[in-house]
Amino acid sequence: MRNGKRLTGLQIVTWTALGMAGGLVAGFVLGEWVGDVNRPRLRRIARRMQERDAGGLPALGAAAAARAATAALRAERALEDLDLTATAVAGGVVELRGWVPSRSLRTHAARVACAVPGINTVINRILVRGEDDRSLPADFQATDQSA
């Protein structure tokens, strides 16, 4: 608006159309320059970032990570007699399950699995006997407090 003049309806429509056309052209040019954004490309980018976070070591595949974690748990003297399992979740990610007699062994098992090269994430679902297997009182009632 120059000198306090108002735009006419035709001018508003013209400038709106020019703005939209310029945005579309810029979007197409940027899309060609940057490339298509799709799930496989985003997964590759996320995998590369995860590998950099792991100190440059490539993440193990899902099955290889589970085998490596299981072998590490069986090789550890304090854990070899316990029935612990490592399940593959994704590349470099394993989930530990089983029962242990103490919290310290639960923590120790997770640390052993984390120390395996190529494993980036450990989901520790190991339960402690005497703590996680207690029964609830007969009069206990659970209530849903979700938002």
Image: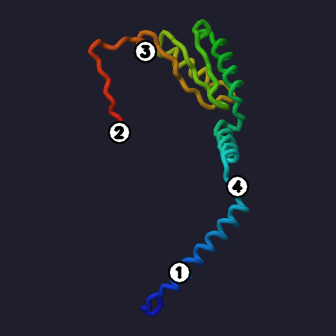
Q: Amino acid at mark 1?
A: Val
**Residue shown at the point (57%, 8%) measured from the top left:** 82
Quote the CA–CA distance across marks 2 and 4.
38 Å
Residue corresponding to mark 2: 147
Residue 110: where, in percent of width, then height?
A: 56, 22
Quote the CA–CA distance across marks 4 and 3.
48 Å
Quote the CA–CA distance across marks 3 and 1.
68 Å
Q: Amino acid at mark 3?
A: Asp
Position of 35 relative to 14 (above/below): above
Disc nearer the start of the sequence (1/4): 1
Position of 14 relative to 69 (above/below): below
Residue 122: where, in percent of width, then height?
A: 58, 27
Say left or right for 65 vs 143. right
Q: Are marks 1 and 2 in contact (CB under 8 Å)?
A: no
**Residue shown at the point (68%, 40%) measured from the top left:** 47
User: Under tag 3, what secondary structure?
Assistant: loop
Disc nearer the start of the sequence (2/3): 3
Residue corresponding to mark 3: 132
Colour scheme: rainbow
Residue corresponding to mark 1: 13
User: Under tag 1, what secondary structure?
Assistant: helix
User: Under tag 2, what secondary structure?
Assistant: loop
Q: Quadrant of residue 63?
A: top right
User: Under tag 4, what secondary structure?
Assistant: loop
